[in-house]
Amino acid sequence: MAEQSFASAANFSHSLTSHYVQTAEEANSAISPVSVFICMSMLKHGATGKTKTELEKSLSINSKNENQDAQHVIRKLTESSNDLFTLTTANGLFLQEGFEPETAFVDHLKSEFTAHVENAKFGSQEGEKIVNDWVKKETNGKIKDLIKDTTEDHVMALVNAVYMKGKWAKPFEKEDTDEGEFNLLSGEKVNVQLMKQIGSFAYVKSGKFVMAFLPYKSASSDTAWEMGILLPEQGLKPTDFLKFLQRDQLKGLRSKAKLERLDVILPKCRVECTIDLIPIFKKLGVKAAFTPGADFSGISANESTMVSSILQKCFVDIDEEGTEAAAATAVMMMLSCAVGGIDEPPITFHVTCPHVYFIYQPSTGIVLFNGVVTDPTVGH
């Protein structure tokens, strides 16, 4: 059953990312699909009827695997954190004063999602501060001011926070970092800080792109994570190659990858994004949840509620030592009324043009973060 859960999370990740990057095609992008998956799984538990069916379909969840998909994923994430690789995830349920959801819903989130439950007076800065302070703490200070402009009609916020810090198994030497040119899609060039090293990495060439996998330090292969970089031929749009991140395609490419001696050049990069996820979920077939006819009777049988916003803030920082990344996803609810031969020259893998990056776990296919870098100078 766990394998099916990982497949659901991976398939959802591909669907979500494909729609997301279409709206951010000319800019750097970052998203944490797994954070959205967990947060929306909490919401799904309170949905019934058509509302629930649409949410399950958008999340690629098989209803026969009832309510266990997110638990399997959370457990795998938790198991991946150790002295070599930091990975934390936390869930929160924040309730408007006076709003009393179904006891079974709250108990389920506490027991199955280990959710932190707290009252917060929405419509006030004090109430928003309670949520934002919790998010800031759970993301090691990287995600701030997740929610704002709430009103008294907001009755609930479901929040997931993810934080990771991984060190490269083979770090780049800082003294080797130098300024160099990065080719933009427009044909222009910008000067960026380029990290450099020669080493053995998993590498595969396929058609009009090459792909390399840079591993993070890990305690075992079962809990190992790595950054994959899909580098298209110069001048081609990275977004046109996202189909190769589909779970089966990626699994096939990773299995074909061979340890090769690579001459790697990689830009230092920091990406920060705020994403409105409702338009994306509408494209994924979720309609009812955003209307007064939404059926969230599992959350409250006495008051009709609907989803008013789904928002994610994401942060990814790539440097010589490794990667630090964080994301927080919030669902706001409101009342409805209101190796190669050492003597051979290394293969060139110079990431000096727009490319796709993704942080994923080969053993499960779970994608923690991914996005596109079109201009590494943005954000620095």
Image (cartoon, rainbow, N blue to C red):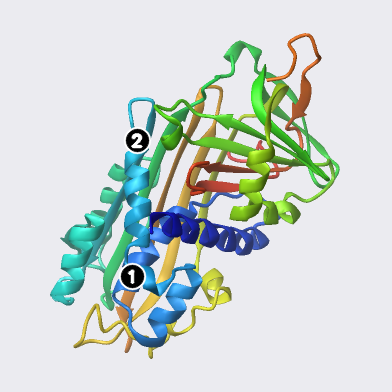
- Label tally: 2
The quadrant in which the C terminus is found is top right
Q: Residue 172 carries which label?
A: none
Q: How far apart are marks 1 and 2 (CA)?
A: 26 Å
Q: Where is residue 204 in the image (x, y as percent from the top left)?
A: 73, 36
> Is residue 148 in view?
no
x 34%, y 35%: residue:
81
Q: Residue furthest front?
A: 1
Check if mark 1's residue and mark 2's residue have beta carbons within 8 Å.
no
> Sequence order check: which comes first, mark 1 or mark 2?
1
Instruction: Classify 254 as above or below 43.
Output: above
Local SS, label 2: loop
Is the residue marked by circle 1 packed among few (<14), some (14-19), or many (20+) residues within 10 Å?
few
Q: Where is residue 198 in the image (x, y as percent from the top left)?
A: 69, 16
125 relative position to 104: left or right: right
222 relative position to 343: left or right: left
